[in-house]
Image (spheres, rainbow, N blue to C red):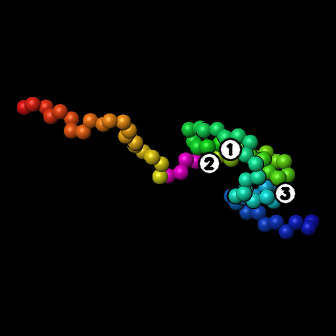
Amino acid sequence: MGTPETQTDGSVVDECPRCGWPESEIYQVLSRHLTSEGVVAYTRCACGEVQVRVQPYAAGRVVTASCGPSRTDPAPPGL
Ligand SMILES: [Zn+2]
C-alpha cells in the first residue's frame, strides 16, 4: 500500500510511469521518422526510459502550392 493511485480505464498516461516526467516536456529526442500516419518520434526521458510517440499530422497543412510559372487562362477551345 501507499500508492493512492486511482486509475480508471481509458485514462491516458501523460507522464513517465517511471519518474513522472511530463510527456509534454520532451527531455531528449533520439530520432524522428515520417510515416503515413504522422511523425514517429523516439524520445528518451530523464530517467533513461525510451518512449515512442506518434504525432499525427496536424490539420491546416498546405494542400496545394503552385510554384513556378503557371499558365493562367488556358487556351480556350475554338468553337
Ligand atoms: Zn522517466
Query: Which one is in front, 52 or 62?
Result: 62
What residue span does the magenta drawing correspond to? 55-59
Give the main secondary structure, helix, strand or loop, of the magenta stretch.
Answer: loop
Look at the image and tell me in which quarter the N terminus lies. Answer: bottom right
The three-letter amino acid code for the residue at tag 3 is Cys
Q: Is mark 3 within 8 Å of ligand 1?
A: yes
What residue lies at 62% left-to-right and 48% top-to-bottom? 55
Look at the image and tell me in which quarter the C terminus lies. Answer: top left
Q: Residue furthest left?
A: 79
Which sits earlier in the primary sequence, circle 1 or circle 3? 3
Which sits earlier in the primary sequence, circle 2 or circle 3? 3
Instruction: State yes or no: discs 1 and 3 in contact (Cβ < 8 Å).
Output: no
Instruction: State yes or no: discs 2 and 1 in contact (Cβ < 8 Å).
Output: yes
Query: Which one is in front, 74 or 41?
Result: 74
Residue 41's disc number:
1
Which sits earlier in the primary sequence, circle 2 or circle 1? 1
Work out how far the residue at label 1 is from the one at label 3, CA to CA, in angstroms: 20 Å
The three-letter amino acid code for the residue at tag 1 is Ala
Which residue was labeled with disc 2? Answer: 55
